[in-house]
Amino acid sequence: MNIIRKLLIWILGGFFLLYGLIRVAGGGMILKALMGDSDHFGVQDGADKVKAFMNNPSVSAIIPFSPEGYISYIILMGVALLVGTVGVLLNKRWGVWVMSSHFVLYVLLFLNFQVFNIKVALLVGTFILFLALLWLKKNQIRMESGR
């Protein structure tokens, strides 16, 4: 059972690391395209969609973002997820707090734009996986310490 638990921990950890990496790398590529760099990565369409959304007069944000600011925020969320996941996998208490900040930033983004779409399901699903990871880690630590 201990091997299955460790395998599940590493599968979930790998998922979160990959998800964070996609946010950072994808955000970085889109940010480069937004800043006028030639489209080396084929992300100009994504950059144009971000510009269209951010410049849409019907989008009312509590705190308005420029397209570059929005993508920088997405990159920050990815960094929080990457660093937090590493901390959780290494049994560091700060890892839980940093990883949790990713979810707080995500919720604040929805509240700021007052837009609720299919991405809410992604947020809820990943949060459930986060709770599962914490539960597995807590039980792993308890089993290894003999409690």
Image: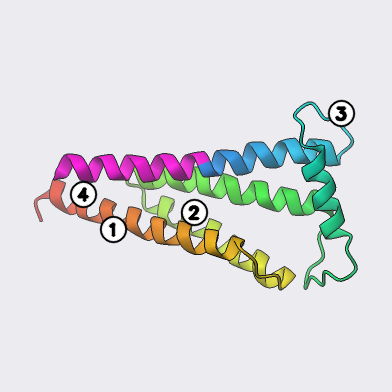
Q: Quadrant of residue 2?
A: top left
Which segment is the magenta one? Answer: 1-18
* Mark 4 surroundings: few (<14), some (14-19) or many (≥20) residues within 10 A: some
Residue type, label 2 = Val
Residue on which disc 2 sits? 98
Check disc 4 and report its element: helix, strand or loop.
helix
Residue on which disc 1 sits? 135
Q: Position of residue 52 (x, y in %)?
A: 86, 55
Q: CA distance from mark 3 to mark 1?
A: 45 Å
> Magenta stretch mostly in which secondary structure?
helix
Residue type, label 4 = Gln
Which mark identifies residue 38?
3
Mark found first going from the N terminus, 2 or 4: 2
Q: Position of residue 130 (x, y in %)?
A: 40, 56
Residue type, label 1 = Trp
Residue plotted at (59% across, 46% down): 78
Any magenta on residue 80?
Answer: no
- Above or below residue 82? Residue 99 is below
Q: CA distance from mark 2 to mark 1?
A: 17 Å
Residue type, label 3 = Ser
Residue plotted at (67% across, 64% down): 109
Residue on which disc 4 sits? 140
Q: CA distance from mark 4 to mark 3?
A: 48 Å
Mark found first going from the N terminus, 4 or 3: 3
- Above or below residue 83? Residue 125 is below
Looking at the figure, which quarter contains the C terminus? bottom left
Which numbered disc, 3 or 2, marks the residue closer to the eye?
3
Mark found first going from the N terminus, 2 or 1: 2
Residue plotted at (67% across, 39% down): 26
